[in-house]
Amino acid sequence: MYANKQRIEQHIERLSQFTATPEVGVTRLTYSKEDLEARNYIKDRMREYGLTVSEDGFGNIFGKLEGSIPDAPSVIVGSHFDSVPNGGAYDGTAGVVIGLEVAALFQEKNCKPAYPLEVIALVEEEGSRFGGGLLGSRGMMGLLTDEDFKVLADKDGILAEQAMKSIGLDPSKEKLRDPKTIKAFLELHIEQGPILEEKAIPIGVVEAIVGLTQLEVTIQGKAGHAGTTPMDHRSDALVAAAEVIAAFPQLAKDEGDGTVITTGQLHVFPNGANVIPDKVVFSVDIRSGKEEHVQNAVRNVEQLIASKQANSILTSSERLLYIAPKEMDSTIRSILKETSDKLNVPYCAINSGAGHDAMVFSDFTACGMIFIPSKDGLSHCPEEWSDANHLVNGANILFQTALQLTEGN
């Protein structure tokens, strides 16, 4: 058991300070001042642990330890370092920190890999600034075209490329990663749910990740005076939107198999207390463990939205993201379980209800993922917390797994 608990805790604590909302959680949006502060810290630690640092045209960070086999594909360990607004200190960040810890252990143990080891810190997994989510992994694997990226903007109209340049990043750098250069991808993540804590099991070996679809819905009505427009003369976009959103719990229940439908973002225009809303834009997040249930739920949601088009109400929906359910690599799952047994760390098989960068990489390379418990099952909030002892367990398991995968056999 090699991982350094104090070092892991120090990295978590230091990165949590790079937030736009001190004392009320971590808010670290992609290409922000806080992004720059965090990336500089990550890059400094990569160099400290003997890695060669680079960034791609999306701002993803790579720290590489060369292997002895010329031009061999890399074993990559890491996660994302952006956050949701007022989120926690562990979501994504814990996976980056454990990647750094694996590199530190390679250095301390003087490990000379045959296949290169890379630590990765990915941008915009959450989609909190530019929407859609998983931007860093989707972009580097060619699932986001350069043309699409050039017009990508946040809610304030700031283009992603403009935001990159504002913190000194270069969007003209190479964006695509050849899948042949990746041997495997390993990711540690907090569970973000209650299962491991309730079972008192410190490690979950992820079997599969749920399918994920995100929609952006626009409902256009007609503005009017809140006091002088009779109720039967109104085309209230917010009322129509509320009727749609209120139907989601029943739609999800009818679909079954753990299907969930969520609206987390809602923008009302013109947003005046005494003005009937003329436009509402809101998000719809649809997830399920089976692709057929995802597709059915999407179809039912889109039909519901279209049914509200009447009485001067216009509706539209745009699909920002669709990723089918993904199974993690069976060989790597076996290695993770065998390693846990050797280290006497109890584990169980688990499925992920959240989307992760591993689900993108799984179409291109062998992927393995482990969860550690989340206190009270909480995530995406300031109260998010995981025990450092569980992080140590995860670091030891990923270190031994990466050691095996970087061997020359």
Image (cartoon, helix red, strand yellow):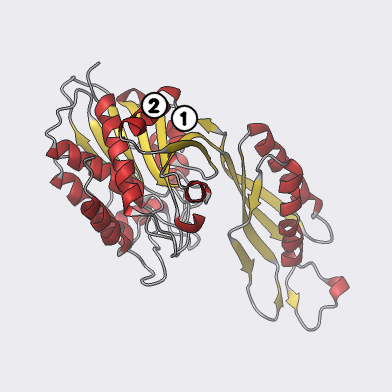
Position of the N terminus, as image quadrant, is: top left
Depth check: 177 or 291 in front?
291
The residue that mark 2 highlights is: 332
Furthest residue in direction top, as rendered: 409
Residue at point 18%, 20% (across, down): 70
Residue at point 37%, 67% (across, down): 20
Q: Is residue 52 above or below residue 277?
A: above
Identity, as a three-letter code, of the amino acid under mark 2: Ile
Q: Secondary structure at mark 1?
A: loop
Q: Position of residue 313 (x, y in %)?
A: 78, 60
* Quarter holding residue 220: bottom right
The label number, if any, that marks residue 143 in the structure image: none
Q: Position of residue 293 (x, y in %)?
A: 68, 36
Depth check: 220 or 357 in front?
357
Q: Position of residue 387 (x, y in %)?
A: 36, 54
Identity, as a three-letter code, of the amino acid under mark 1: Met
The residue that mark 1 highlights is: 328
**Callout count:** 2
Q: In the displayed structure, does residue 381 sit left or right of residue 281? A: left
Q: In the displayed structure, does residue 391 sit left or right of residue 222? A: left
Q: Is residue 251 above or below residue 110?
A: below
Q: Are marks 2 and 1 in contact (CB under 8 Å)?
A: yes
Position of the C terminus, as image quadrant, is: top left
Q: Secondary structure at mark 2?
A: helix
Q: Can residue 143 be seen here?
A: no
Q: Residues within 10 Å of mark 1 (few under 14, many from 20)?
A: many
Depth check: 277 or 204 in front?
204
